[in-house]
Image (tube, rainbow, N blue to C red):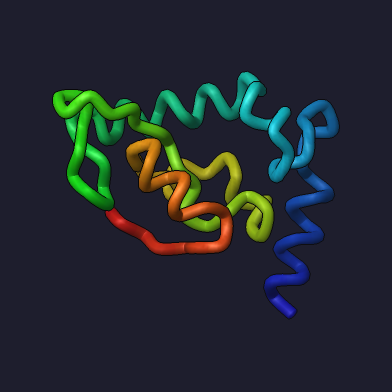
Amino acid sequence: MFDLIRRIVFWWSYPRHLPHPASREFLDTYEWAQVRYQVLLKYRDKPCMACGCGPKQGVWLNVDHIKPRKTHPHLALSVDNCQILCNLCNKGKGNWDSTDWR
C-alpha cells in the first residue's frame, strides 16, 4: 500500500516537461546530466565498483542506476540510487538486476 502511495505522489509531482524515466530521451535531459555529474564527483577516483577496472586500464565508466529506471522511476534522479560501473559490467547488469556494488 505504501509503495502505491509513493508512486502516486511521484507521478503527481513529476515535472511534465521531462520524458518518462525509463525512456532513452530521459538520459539526454539536463536534470539527468546534473545527477550524473554529482555521482561522478562523489565517486571521483573510484574504478568500476563491480570489477575494479578504471580509466587506467582503458575502460569507459558509466553511471548506473542500481534499481532500474523501468521498475523504479521514482528513483531515476536520486544520487543514492547510482553507482559507477564500466561499460562491460553495466551492459551485463542490464535493467533486470538490482545488485548494489558500492
Residue that protrudes farthest toward the left in the picture: 56
Which sits in the foreground, 84 or 13? Answer: 84
Residue 25 image position (x, y, % from top left): 72, 28
| In this view, 57 is above or below 3 | above
Q: x and y percent of residue 7 in the render?
A: 75, 61
Instruction: Say which residue appears at 40% left-offset and 63% top-offset.
Output: 99
Q: Nearer the viewer, residue 50 or 59?
A: 59
Q: 89 left or right of 54?
A: right
Residue 72, image x, y percentages: 64, 57
Describe residue 88's horizontal placement relative to residue 16 as left or right: left
Q: Position of residue 27 (x, y in %)?
A: 62, 29
Residue at position x 30%, y 56% from top?
101
**Can residue 81 be spotted in the picture?**
no
User: Relative to 43, is 74 above or below?
Assistant: below
Q: Quadrant of the N terminus?
A: bottom right
Quadrant into which the C terminus falls: bottom left
Residue 37 visible: yes
Q: At x 33% / y 38%, what residue is drawn? A: 86
Relative to 34, is 11 above or below? below
Residue at (84, 33) in percent of width and height: 16
Q: How many marks?
A: 0
In front of the other: 2 or 28: 28
